[in-house]
Every structure is written in C-alpha cells, then in structure tokens.
Amino acid sequence: METGGPSSATIDRLSSLPGNVIDNILSCLSTKEAARTSCLSKHWKEKWHTVSCIVLEEKMLSERMQSQIEGIITYILTKHAGDIEICSLSVGTVKFFYDMKSWMWRLSRKSVQELTLKVQRGTRHDVPLDLFFCEQLRHLTLRYFLFRPPCTFRGFRNLVNLDLKKITISKEALESLLASCPQLETLIVKKLSCVDHLHINASNLKYLSFGGEFKSMCFNTPLLTVLSLNMYRIVSEQNNFDLRFIIRGLPPAIEELYVRCPFKKFLAAGNRLAQVSTCYNNVTTLGLDEFCFKQMDQVSCLLSLIQCFPNLQLLEIKACSCDNEAAQAAVLEFWEEDKHPTCSLDQLCNARVRSFHGDDSEMRFIKFVMANSPKLNEMTVEPIINPDYNEIVIIAQLMDLPQASEKGKVNYVAYNPHVNSGDFSDEDGDSSDDAYSSESE
C-alpha cells in the first residue's frame, strides 16, 4: 500500500467536479446559501457568481440585515457573471429609486426569463424603464408600481405569465400591454387602480384572475377557460355591475367561472337575468360569493345562471348573513310551491355551501340540489364560525334529505380558519381577497 500521499480527509473532491455539476449544486441552494459557499476556500470564492437563479426577499433576512437589503441586492447583481434565468427581488420600501433602476439595468443585460419585483409599501414608483427592454421575459410579476411604458414599447413578445398586484395603470396602457403579448396564457391582476370599461384582447389567454376597479369587461379571448372576478371594493350601491353583460360576453371556451362580489350588487336590473338564453356547454365549475339565500331575486338569478351552464359539475356558494325574515317567507313559499324553473343539474358531481347559517332557505336550496342531481357524489356544508344552531339536529336533517344520486353523501365540515380557499390570497401577507378553493397570490 502506498504511503506518503495526501490523506483522503484532505482531498477536495467537490472542487474537482465539472463546472456544470457545481452550477447544478449551487442552483439547489438559496441565494443566501450559495453566497456563503465563498467562505469554503479560495477556489470557491467566486463560484456563486454564476448561479442562474437569484431570490432575495427582505423577510428571508435577519432583522439587522433587512435594513441593508438594497445594498445586498446591488452587490450580488454587480458581482454576478453570466445570464440569470430567474430573479425574484422583494423589498419593504424603496429608499433610493436609483438602486432599483440600477438593478433593472443589469438584469436587462442578463437575458432574464422569469422576473419578480415586489415593493410592500411606501411611495409608488414607476417601473424602471429598462424592464421594457427585457424581450426574453416569459414570466413577470410586479407589485406596487406605476406602470407607464414608453411610447417605443412594443410589448413582451415571449411573455406567458403576467402577475400584477397593486399596480396603477391607465386603461389604454393595460389594453395595449395585453394586446402586445401574443404568447400570454395566464393573467393575474389584483387590486388594480385603473379602469372603467375594459376590453381584454389576448388571443392566447387561458386563465384570467382579475380584481380591481372596472364597470364592465368584454373579451376577445377565444381560448380562455378560467375566469375569476373580484369586485369586493369596487362596486358601490350606486354603481351596480350588470352580470348580464358578463354572461352574454363570456368566451366560448370558458370552463370555470368564479365571481367574488356581494351577489346583490349583480342585480341592478332585478331578476331580468332570466332573459339571458345563451348556453355555455363547456362550463363545469361555478363559484359565487356573498350569496343571500333569503332574497328571492338572488335565488331567481342563481337558477337562471345554472340554466346557462347545463354541464355544470362543481357548484360552490359562499352564503352571507342577511336578516330579512319577511323576504325569506317569499323564498320558502317559492320552494314549497315548486315555482322554480326546471334546472339541469344532470352533470353536477360536487356542491359546496360555505358559511352555512342553518337557515331554512339554505336547507331548501340544498334539498333542491340533492333532489335534482343524479350524479352528485358529495354535498359539502361548511358552517360559519360558532354557529348558533343545534348542529346535531341540522346534521340529522341534512342526512335525511332525499337525493337523486345513489352514491351521493353529505359532508358536514367544521370551519377551519387555516384552510385558505383562495385564488385571491396574497402570499405577501394581504389575504383579504381570498377566493375559491378550485383555483390557483
């Protein structure tokens, strides 16, 4: 056996690996961990400079380091060599806008394909101009900016996913942006301050989640399959949104429709929604929010909606509290005398009533669904927090309801505050816009 050679304990086998293998190893580490490898040895001092993924968020740093976040980002981007495929930067506030402009200037020369820029609070700044020269972008997420593209901007020709939160943008700029992104498939907009009557012109768009200020919306989106609308903070009592407009203008390929708005605000024209005769045979999922089962006009509107979707498979409704016993009497009479129109629920497989209050009007609707859904697998009832009714009695009544399906069952699920059913949930800590569990902030 040979002796005198270096012991196995002193051999640096990791450093002798091919460069592409080391790059792959570094890509599995966080940006902070990758930078710390510079302390391993002189050989490793600059290895992290070529990582293709940079993720720096203020909340990931210690309290002492958070105050230095802008300097840290500047240092890392200055030292970086080569292309950056993914870059995600999140800061609390922008102390010096020049720093952010310098980040964007460097990134525009790095062939970045997936970019996230988030500011949590403070002054709302313009998007750095160099962003508009990132022609390779495929995924773009912006939070808390003014979006005013230069007149020379011709769009992001390769953009597939666009996520805008708390962005101030003109109607014209938004419509122009969408029309100039021919590959755009996913658009998520939350808390947008911009528009009156909005025209969505995106020939390749498949998923649209929109929460912001608008009075009406029309679509030139032939491939759109999922539409989620959030109008909680937008529609006032004096400015009702006309649901008939949306239903008449739905893209033909639509499969899932989610409406986040107090349902009564859809009734600017009373129950004339029943006049809408268009059928959307592709729609399989309908989610509605803040629905009052005690209001006759809302119940009538809901049944008219269901008639528009003969192949509905999933129905999810979040009830609201509406103390109007006089109005409820008319609804109970409506159900009791079988005055409701014939609704096609032949394809319904799953139904869910959230924020269940135990009211007779809610029970009658559940009874109606179960009695008219031959393919129903599960009726899920999720009660409000601390219900003031006898749950044992209510559960027994639910279990005794007649049903058309041989395999259908009732699932009474206790309220779970940790379950986030939200397309409008916000990973940055603002979850006031939670939406439906069937959707993918």
Image (cartoon, helix red, strand yellow):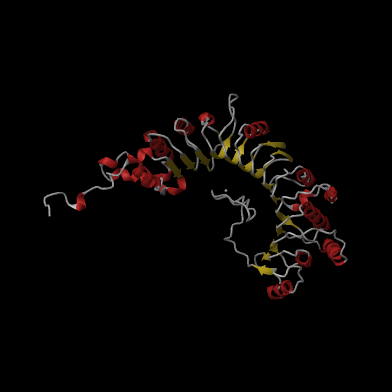
Image location (x, y in percent) of residue 67: 43, 43
Image location (x, y in percent) of residue 237: 77, 47
Number of marks: 0
Q: Is residue 120 left or right of residue 244?
A: left
Image location (x, y in percent) of residue 363: 76, 67
Q: Is residue 18 above or below residue 297?
A: above
Image location (x, y in percent) of residue 240: 78, 45
Q: Is residue 233 left or right of residue 143?
A: right
Furthest residue toward front: 1
Q: Is residue 253 above or below residue 198?
A: below
Query: Foreground residue, 94 or 4?
Result: 4
The N terminus - image quarter: bottom left
Say which quarter of the image contains residue 158. top right
Q: Residue at x 60, y 24 (%)?
A: 151
Say which quarter of the image contains residue 103. top left
Q: Residue at x 79, y 49 (%)?
A: 279
Q: Is residue 405 left or right of residue 438?
A: right
